[in-house]
Every structure is written in structure tokens, then in C-alpha cells.
């Protein structure tokens, strides 16, 4: 918005729900004509998966397909699996800010504040997840 007048702007977004209002605001602010080109076609399908972290071949379970429909069978399969050791460890952690203790940002005896990305068994789950998505050629992933 604060760019010089001679700079042209191009916006690309798959997630802006109020395109007309946004483009109108840009046009009024920059005092220029704005053209909106939109399509419902999605070149990359949007799907949602649950990662169970359970060893074996059934780690990723699709729960929303590329048409935006909930997949109850995929959810049921994922929710019926026994929790992994890492998931059990996470479930046992104290809740609340700072992981326990009496002061803000305090420490409990068994759960020290983590550095980069935490630590403990959760890191192994994350590494396992990254290896799986690399193996299935699902990168890049958000």
C-alpha cells in the first residue's frame, strides 16, 4: 500500500474469501483500476490427513477428500488405533502455561522447558512424520 505509485501490484491467493471487498479497498487506496480474475478450479487438491504416529503402514489417514467431503471411514480407522508411546507421553504432560511450576514460565521436575522444537519423545514422532511424507513424496506440505 505504501509503495510508490509507479509500482504495479499482483496478488495471488487461494484463501481470500472477500476478494471483491479487498480489491475495492486496494483500488480506492491506490486510486487505480483493479481487475479480479478468479476461478473455482484448484490445480492442487486440498486434502486433510490425520497422522497417528503408530508404527506400521497405517500412519496417514485421509479425513477430508479433494472435494472437501469428510471421510468418516478414514477418521474411524485412525481413531480406533492404539495410541503410540509418544502420544501417551504427551497426554500425561501437565496442561497450562509453562508446563507447571508456580511461576509464569516455570518448570516441573519431569518436564523441562524445551529449546528448539521441544524435545523428548515428541521429536521422534515429528522425525517419523517427516520421513513418512518424504517417502510418500507428499512434500511440500503445510
Image (cartoon, grey):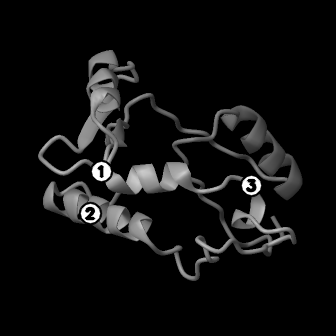
Instruction: Name the residue beneath numbered marker 3.
Output: 96
Q: Foreground residue, 55 or 64?
A: 55
Does dot 1 land on a helix, a strand or a loop?
Answer: loop
In this picture, is 76 found above or below 116?
above
Location of residue 132 in the rendering, given as x and y in whole percent from the top left corner: 21, 58
Does dot 2 land on a helix, a strand or a loop?
Answer: helix
Q: Visible in this render: residue 13?
A: yes
Compute the Cα span from label 3 to label 1: 24 Å
In this picture, is 109 found above or below 130?
below
Count of numbered circles on the image:
3
Q: In this view, does 94 lie to the left or right of 135?
A: right
Location of residue 67 in the rendering, given as x and y in whole percent from the top left corner: 35, 23
Judged by depth in the image, the label closer to the viewer, 3 or 2, is 3
Crowd band around label 3 with a 10 angstrom C-alpha radius: few (<14), some (14–19), many (20+): few
Marks 1 and 2, the one that precedes in the sequence: 1
Compute the Cα span from label 3 to label 2: 27 Å
Most extreme residue toward the front, as rendered?
A: 109
Crowd band around label 1 with a 10 angstrom C-alpha radius: few (<14), some (14–19), many (20+): many
Quadrant for the C terminus, please.
Answer: bottom left
Q: In this view, does 16 lie to the left or right of 31?
A: left
Please name the residue shown 79% across and 50% down the image.
26
Instruction: Name the residue beneath numbered marker 1.
Output: 53
In this picture, is 19 found above or below 127?
above
Please name the residue shown 36% across and 39% down the image.
50
Residue 128, which numbered label?
2
Marks 3 and 1, the one that precedes in the sequence: 1
| Whether label 1 touches label 2, CB < 8 Å | yes
Amino acid at each position: 500500500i505504501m509503495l510508490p505509485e509507479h509500482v504495479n501490484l499482483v496478488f495471488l491467493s487461494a484463501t481470500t474469501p472477500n476478494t471483491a471487498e479487498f480489491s475495492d479497498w486496494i483500488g480506492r487506496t491506490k486510486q487505480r483500476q483493479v481487475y479480479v480474475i478468479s476461478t473455482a478450479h484448484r490445480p492442487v487438491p486440498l486434502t486433510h490427513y490425520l497422522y497417528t504416529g503408530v508404527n506400521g503402514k497405517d500412519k496417514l489417514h485421509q479425513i477430508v477428500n479433494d472435494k472437501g467431503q469428510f471421510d468418516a471411514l478414514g477418521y474411524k480407522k485412525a481413531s480406533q488405533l492404539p495410541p503410540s508411546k509418544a502420544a501417551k507421553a504427551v497426554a500425561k504432560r501437565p496442561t497450562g502455561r509453562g508446563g507447571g511450576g508456580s511461576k509464569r514460565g516455570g518448570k516441573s521436575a519431569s518436564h523441562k522447558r524445551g529449546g528448539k522444537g521441544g524435545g523428548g519423545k515428541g521429536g521422534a514422532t515429528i522425525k517419523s512424520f517427516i520421513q513418512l511424507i518424504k517417502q510418500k513424496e507428499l512434500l511440500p506440505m503445510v
